[in-house]
Image (cartoon, rainbow, N blue to C red):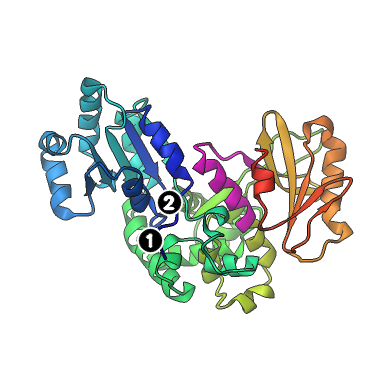
């Protein structure tokens, strides 16, 4: 498969015209290196994965930056010694777009950025393909096919089956990245924890319950969750704060950025198995909400997605904050529209009043409807919401 253009390319070029340093982070194999090489073909590409390059940068930072005065530096967090020298250099040169830095580990990279490059770098996040980026190139026709395969570029570029890609991805992630971020002695226990997280996709996080099942403390659960968040494996969807005089759930909901990874961890071996899986609804929610977040990141914006649930179980799957308004969105994996789809929307809009924008129902079917109380749109027409955000 040929190179698939990334939406973020436009924004990253714009930021390179305004900041001396641009930093691109995101999960391993999300396409960061490919993107920066395509966006900045005139710059030499230097990877700190290369041991010789890493030693040069670490042992002689001044000489390294003199040799590469204007470059793309991949996996820059592996040579942390250069950050303070980059700060000095860009301050003296006063040149925009001088260095493009990439890195996979949020903790490690941002610790160095906040220490040395605050105010001098624009920071962007690149996740695996969005549905909008891949739709024209993939041959898939159903949401289940997209959910099962996931969105990592290598799956599409090399035509790798999920059953071949994800085991090696997890092994690499756990053995290399997790050890770098935090020294975890029992990696097998961490892998069990990862699988338990997949089993709770779309659910309210219960730290003590998760800890009991994995044989770890609540404190360790929180610490390991932080690792999964920092390396862009999971995201915790926060409850929206507006309570409308109702008692609200205050804990976040757990989702995976990539549904192919989550499906593999759940032991789903085929699209057919996914169709009847007990957590198909949670995977479908993860698929839709992660696409909203990808669209925001691709425009250089922060995540503005939330959910809403009160103590009586009334719930909205996703609320998108937009200019002082809230867009209520219900997400249903079923392919037939029923009256039940509208109950949460009707309840929420009644108590939210003017704070709520016109609501949407996103479902797994293929026919759209404009109802009096909501727009019903298909899973593959998310642009109709995203264009309003």
Which residue is rendered at x = 36% and y = 29% of the image?
A: 17
> What is the C-alpha distance between the residues marked 2 and 1?
9 Å
In the picture, measured across the screen, residue 93 lies left or right of residue 263, that is left
Element assignment for label 1: helix
Q: Whole-percent x and y of residue 229?
A: 48, 49
Q: Which residue is mark 1?
A: 173
Q: Magenta part of the protein: which range? A: 287-305
Where residue 363 sits, quadrant-wise, is bottom right
Q: Residues within 10 Å of mark 2 (few under 14, many from 20)?
A: many
Q: Which residue is mark 2?
A: 231
Q: Whole-percent x and y of residue 280?
A: 67, 67
Q: Magenta stretch: dominant SS? A: helix
Which residue is rendered at x = 35% and y = 53% of the image?
A: 34
Is 298 magenta? The answer is yes
Q: Nearer the viewer, residue 119 or 172?
A: 119
Q: Nearer the viewer, residue 346 or 195?
A: 346
Which residue is rendered at x = 37% and y = 67% of the image?
A: 171
Q: Is residue 149 visible?
A: yes
Q: Nearer the viewer, residue 272 or 192?
A: 272
Q: Are marks 2 and 1 in contact (CB under 8 Å)?
A: yes
Q: Is residue 110 visible?
A: no
Is 91 magenta? The answer is no
Q: Whole-percent x and y of residue 128?
A: 47, 55
Where residue 355 sits, quadrant-wise, is top right
């Amino acid at each position: 498969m040929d190179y698939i253009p990334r939406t973020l390319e436009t924004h990253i070029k714009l930021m390179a015209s305004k900041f001396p340093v641009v930093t691109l982070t995101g999960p391993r194999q999300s396409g960061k290196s490919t993107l920066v090489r395509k966006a900045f073909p005139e710059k030499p590409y230097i990877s700190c994965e290369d041991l010789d390059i890493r030693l040069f940068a670490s042992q002689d930072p001044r000489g390294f930056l003199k040799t590469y005065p204007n470059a793309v530096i991949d996996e820059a967090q592996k040579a942390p010694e250069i950050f303070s020298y980059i700060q000095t250099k860009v301050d003296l040169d006063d040149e925009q777009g001088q260095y493009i830095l990439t890195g996979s580990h949020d903790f490690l990279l941002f610790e160095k950025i906040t220490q040395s490059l605050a105010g001098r770098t624009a920071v962007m996040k690149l996740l695996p393909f969005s549905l909008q980026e891949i739709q024209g190139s993939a041959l898939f026709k159903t949401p289940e096919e997209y959910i099962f395969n996931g969105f990592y570029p290598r799956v599409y570029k090399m035509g790798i089956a999920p059953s071949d890609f994800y085991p090696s991805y997890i092994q690499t992630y756990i053995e290399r990245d997790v050890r770098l971020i935090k020294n975890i002695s029992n990696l097998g226990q961490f892998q069990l924890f990862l699988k338990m997280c997949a089993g709770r996709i779309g659910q309210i996080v219960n730290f003590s319950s998760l800890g009991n099942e994995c044989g770890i403390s609540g404190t360790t659960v929180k610490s390991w969750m932080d690792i999964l968040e920092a390396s862009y494996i999971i995201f915790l969807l926060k409850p929206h704060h507006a309570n409308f005089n109702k008692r609200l759930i205050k804990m976040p909901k757990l989702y995976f950025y990539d549904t192919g990874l989550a499906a593999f961890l759940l032991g789903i071996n085929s699209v057919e198995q996914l169709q009847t899986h007990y957590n198909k609804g949670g995977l479908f929610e993860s698929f839709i909400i992660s696409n909203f977040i990808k669209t925001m990141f691709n425009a250089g914006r922060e995540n503005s997605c939330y959910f809403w649930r009160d103590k009586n179980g009334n719930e909205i799957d996703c609320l998108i904050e937009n200019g002082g308004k809230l867009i209520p969105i219900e997400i249903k994996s079923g392919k037939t529209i029923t009256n039940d789809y509208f109950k949460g929307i009707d309840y929420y809009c009644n108590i939210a009043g003017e704070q709520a924008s016109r609501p949407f129902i996103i479902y797994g079917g293929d026919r759209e409807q404009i109802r009096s109380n909501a727009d019903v749109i298909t899973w593959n027409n998310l642009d109709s919401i995203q264009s309003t955000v």
